Amino acid sequence: MAPDALIPETRVLAIASHVVHGYVGNKMVTSVMQSLGCDVSAINTVHYSNHTAYKQVKGTKTSPDQILDLYEGLRQSNLNNFDVLLTGYMPSAHCVQAIGKIGRDIRFNAGTKPGSFFWVLDPVMGDNGKLYIPEDEVPEYKTLLREADLILPNQFEAELLSETTITDLDSLAAAIQVLHKKYQVPHVIITSLRLTRDNRTVSSRVPSRAASKPTSATASGQQTPVESPHIDPARTHPASQSMQDGESERSKPEDPDAGASTSRQPPVEMEEQDEEIKNITIIGSTATSDFKPRLFRIDTPELPLFFSGTGDMFAALTIPRLIEAVHAASTPDADLTSKPSWRSPDDVPADELPLAKACQKVLASMQSILNKTTATCREKMLAYDTRAEKEGCGQGQEAAEEKAKKRHLALMEASEVTVPRFLRELVYPPEVEKFRPTAVKEGDRVPQSVGEKEPDELNVLHLGVGKDGEGGTQVVDGER
């Protein structure tokens, strides 16, 4: 490692969405990770002109065969020796299968050296009780869980994957133990949790807050993908929950080639704050050797604007910061980098885990960047509104709608998180101590049996992978 390098030389393959303008998906991921010293190769699952919150977009989806063909080109040239795989939005079940093949091939190429390959899986499936993907994609995601080292679900996705309803910290701890024990996932971070003062969660089965006042004449309402079954590659950040109030920013046109999307979008400026909930919480865990959770939490102030791609920023920052923390925790006698999935010994407390240390820096960087983006956005929109007021907009409904559309487009542009302008905040996160992780004691109360698989009446143990009735099985000893 060079004296001034943040992390050792690290090759990352990122498979996610792409936009020509703005910073979501691989555009965000590449910018962030390269800023922190990673060598990033990108395979794009969709190609869009811009993110879909603009309400109009052109572009295409990448087919599973095209994804595999691109990877095959890398393999033929001996360019598939990646240290990390980051996978985000996948537009179909067949794409999930293709990514699984790629991940398994990279892990196989890593050989028998533990810790030489790490897979971060962001399971983009839905939110607010609604799927944003075809139903047949969910079991395919479950087949990938055992392959991943770290997963980044939101509350709804964690409930889907663990088949556990999350209502409080006890049930959240149980859900994470299921992911640790049943699917053998070493590391889990659940993002965008909204907790009441008594640590109960806001249900993921309904929108997380009442609709805020739209900033244009177009009504936002509480539209869900059931009403407009579009999918979008972008994710949200724990500090920008407002984008989850209606149709998620993940939505996208079903057929981008056909032209512009006219689907409604969530409010972009939040008029009210829930008086009881003013923070967004992430809760993470690294499993012990017997797959018990070690839970930590970090609370971040909720911000008043809509942002695109901040979930991608979270994932992208987590990779180099976790690598940094793992190296810092290693000693000549105990090299964590050579341990499978970089999992810490059982005696490391939750708030001292490398994963917790990484999240602390990640959120410090993001909060600073988003606060500055918010201030810049407000300045730009004030100037825009001043100009628009002088110019006028004509009379009638059509003129009003055109004015609202132009303002919305201006607001989307003003709220773009232009990460190349925030290199200092990425590399040197400010006020890190404000985001110190704390241990969550509820993780110690989960019964040992939660997440354990029991054989059926024929002593066949279903391993929790593959589609229901079609997945891996094991015949166990009758005396078990």
Image: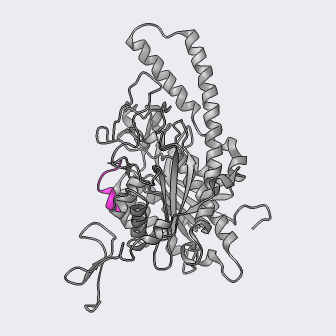
For the point 50% across and 59% down, the residue is 283
Is residue 36 rendered to the left or right of residue 93? right
For the point 43% across and 73% down, the residue is 184
Do we see residue 25 in this rendering? no
Outermost left residue: 457
* The C terminus, quarter of image: bottom left
- Return the residue nearer the eye: 97 or 350: 350
Residue 455 found in image quarter: bottom left
Outermost right residue: 3
Q: Is residue 135 magenta?
A: yes
Do we see residue 220 in this rendering? yes
Outermost front residue: 198
Which stretch appears magenta? 132-140
Q: Is residue 83 placed above or below 203 in the rendered structure? A: below
Q: Position of residue 429 (x, y in %)?
A: 69, 51
Q: Is residue 356 placed above or below 434 in the rendered structure? A: below
Is residue 233 rendered to the left or right of residue 470? right
- Return the residue nearer the eye: 264 or 187: 187
Q: Position of residue 351 (x, y in %)?
A: 59, 66
Q: Position of residue 60 (x, y in %)?
A: 42, 42
For the point 50% across and 79% down, the residue is 289
Q: Is residue 427 magenta?
A: no
Q: Position of residue 446 (x, y in %)?
A: 41, 71
Residue 435 found in image quarter: bottom right
* The N terminus, quarter of image: bottom right
